[in-house]
Image: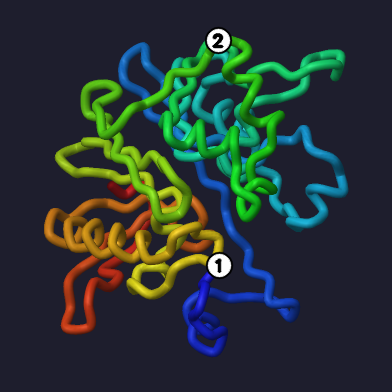
Amino acid sequence: MFGVVPKVIWGKSYPSDDNNLCNWSMRCLLIVDGDRKMMIDCGIGDKQSEKFFANYHLNGEDTLEKSLSTLGFTMDDITDVILTHLHFDHAGGAVRWNAERTDYDVAFKNATYWTSRRQWEWATSPNNREKASFLKENILPIREKGKLILIEGDTELMPDVSVRIFNGHTDGQVIPFMRYKGKTVVFMADLLPSAAHIPLPWVMSYDTRPLITLKEKEAFMAEAAEKGFVLFLEHDLYRECCTVESTDRGVRLKEHFALIDV
């Protein structure tokens, strides 16, 4: 998760167990605006084999259905799903078994699914390094069910919700920007997995083009510090949101807090 950064350094910023395993969240975000209910990413899902899940030591009791129910919603209420990219931990929950477990169906039956054209093409013709992260059963049923819309570039999806395209982690990663109560909230996906990844060289080994990630991070983090963006962290188990500031050591964490505090 921290690439070339040695454990003696990253271990001070993010805890691990005796097997060097770190615990990470798969935190999704729901936007409600009138009749539109937009879900950003949808976790790993539950349709893979027990052997597959055992590799990732899943823990915790949260599910999308449980979380939505606490807000008075169901999966069928969702009108839009933004998939930042199609790695299994971000898109696995987009598709589920049908009732008979004979075929796959979309998990949000009334929703339009959005991702970038570049990411779709990248994921459906994957390179050897990344193909284990792109599972056909997470991806192809969305198009087969006629639910897919492909984003060509930076664009506005609805009032106060726009997206930008980033290419370092995986080609065509979609990063949503939301205007809320006078602030800009950015869903960071794997552009910034956790607050520990704020220093520029802290780039995941998973990134297909880390030098591009460095350039993307440098430009984005400078903008985030200047404009006071609220960064919503998908994978940081300990910090849900944060802001950053410019220092003599570069951009660094300013404060962290829960989204409800915004």
- Please give left or right for residue 236 compared with residue 89 in the image: left
**Residue 46 placement (x, y as % from top left):** 74, 35
Q: Secondary structure at mark 2?
A: loop
- Please give left or right for residue 11 compared with residue 191 in the image: right
Instruction: Name the foreground residue: 153 vs 10.
Output: 153
Which residue: 54% across, 89% down? 8
**Residue 201 placement (x, y as % from top left):** 38, 75
- Look at the image and tell me in which quarter the N terminus lies: bottom right
Which residue: 35% across, 60% down? 212
Q: Is residue 150 above or below residue 219?
A: above
Q: Secondary structure at mark 1?
A: loop
**Residue under pointer 2:** 146
Q: Is residue 39 above or below residue 33?
A: below
Amino acid type assigned to the residue bearing label 2 in the image: Gly
**Residue under pointer 1:** 1
Badge 2: how crowded within 10 Å, few (<14), some, or many (20+)? few
Q: Mark 1 to mark 2: distance in Å? A: 35 Å
Which residue: 29% across, 39% down? 164
Q: Residue furthest bottom?
A: 8
Which residue: 22% across, 43% down? 184
Amino acid type assigned to the residue bearing label 1 in the image: Met
Badge 1: how crowded within 10 Å, few (<14), some, or many (20+)? some
